[in-house]
Image: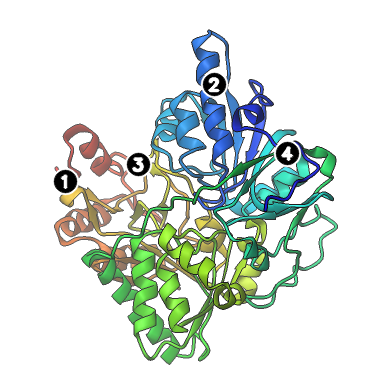
Amino acid sequence: MTIRLPFPELTPEEAAAHYKDGQLVGFSGFTPAGAAKATPRALAELAKAEHDAGRPFRIRVLAGASTGEDIDERLAAVDAISWRAPYQSSKSLRKAVNEQRCEFVDMHLSHVGQMLEFGFFGDIDVAVIEAVDVTPDGRIYLSTSSGISPSVIKHAKKIIVEINAAHSTRLAEMHDVTVLPVPPNRAPIPVHAPMGRIGTPFCACNPERIIGIVRTDEPDRVPAAREPDDVSNAIAGHIVRFLLDEMHAGRIPAEFLPLQAGVGNIANAVLGGLAQNPEIPDFQMYTEVLQDSQMALLRSGRLLGASTSAITVSDEHIAEIYNDMDFFSPRIVIRPTEISNNPGIIRRLGVIAINTVLEADIYGCANSTHVCGTQLMNGIGGSGDFVRNSYLSILVAPSIAKRGAISTIVPMCSHVDHSEHSIQILVTDQGLADLRGLGPKERSERIIEQCAHPSYRDYLRAYAGQSHTGHLRHDLDRAFELHRNLLDRGHMLP
């Protein structure tokens, strides 16, 4: 039976009518998980109608990270986004950003909540939050993600709640909602273990700011994960052997350390490889996204529990979770990004972080955001939060891409997101380079010999040996020769 609430029930079109050109709109969602659905679709239709009538209609979009197709892709396809932060993965929005039709602010995800608290973005005019329930006194129970929803709810002038019947109301059992006070009034965050809880299962707000609810019944539509390929499995093998060596050397405790893994095949392959090795003890995760591959690990008991900001799993696996909440509920904690990605907690827990990059240079700097230094791919996301603060920082990439036309190991990164000061371990399918304690000359030799593809090693050796003297040996006339070759001829090698 549908419970009637003291908030008006709106159609998506009625909800969209509350938006005006130029407003800052806060959306729930961290990846497609927990992203609003019906209201942004109606908003895209409204924008198209306004444009057809010759009237301006573009909004500023703030969400926890990337979103579902109904937000970034649909709105960007009708040129309805003028500004976006802090991350995206939409083809249409990426095109708009690279053509400078949309301003994009690429941010560390752990910073977004605090910036909202300080008012750096201005006022949030309207928020659209997906939830499983809302109470008359203003408690909003989120769905499959937290992201920045708690902070958005706190600071929005108006709130529209999409109550999605496709999700289990028992998701409240997993949520641990905390909004930190602004400095200098912060005490230490009392998260002392990956599964430790410090907050409430709901977001609280003044119910007068909730202007209506929209009822939906739609899954998150997260694509199913692909099976790891040979390259991913090779990278995973190098990392598993390295972590075993660290355990045997006493640099990783016998009970192991919590893991963070970015999105994608390589991360899934690494976790699978760790789980299959009997010398690796059962482990926990302190991460930002929970994916399909972790479901089997939870079932097997190899993954004891996971702290995350989103349950980004396919429809098949989310149904598995909802059908057995007694099993999954105590093993998953969903946190706001300001907690899941918090540098202090990451360092306190000793997280082992594994993240993917687009390219790395021979001295250990890495680029995770811009192709050839100019074309935005997705954004830095949460990788910087973990790379800079983890106990072990591991960056991974295939050694080549586009059938060898691209080397991911280059003389100088065309854009730097992670400097050599933060990167400890670099891994490709060719091998693993442990860069701890090495100077630039030693780093370049190890990266070239261990990580570069054989077809590019001679070029990179020659560059490192012939470049000008200095602490970092670079030839500024040739530093981006591989990138220029790619742009001019479609292949990095001359």
How far apart, in angstroms, are the residues tagged by discs 4 and 3? Answer: 37 Å
Front position in the image: 486 or 346: 346
How far apart, in angstroms, are the residues tagged by discs 4 and 1? Answer: 54 Å
How far apart, in angstroms, are the residues tagged by discs 2 and 3? Answer: 31 Å
Q: Marks 4 and 2: CB-CB under 8 Å?
A: no
- Picture quadrant of residue 300: bottom left
User: Residue 61: horizontal and vertical position, in percent?
Assistant: 59, 34
The relative height of residue 346 versus residue 480 in the rendered view (above or below) is below
Residue drawn at (27%, 70%) of the image: 233
User: Residue 439: horizontal and vertical position, in percent?
Assistant: 41, 67
Residue ID for mark 4: 159
- Mark sitting earlier along the chain (4/1): 4
Residue ID for mark 2: 47
Q: Residue furthest top?
A: 54
Front position in the image: 228 or 254: 228
- Mark sitting earlier along the chain (4/3): 4
The relative height of residue 43 versus residue 330 in the rendered view (above or below) is above
Residue ID for mark 1: 493
Amino acid tagged 4:
Ile
Q: Marks 3 and 1: CB-CB under 8 Å?
A: no
Residue drawn at (48%, 62%) of the image: 318
How far apart, in angstroms, are the residues tagged by discs 4 and 2? Answer: 20 Å
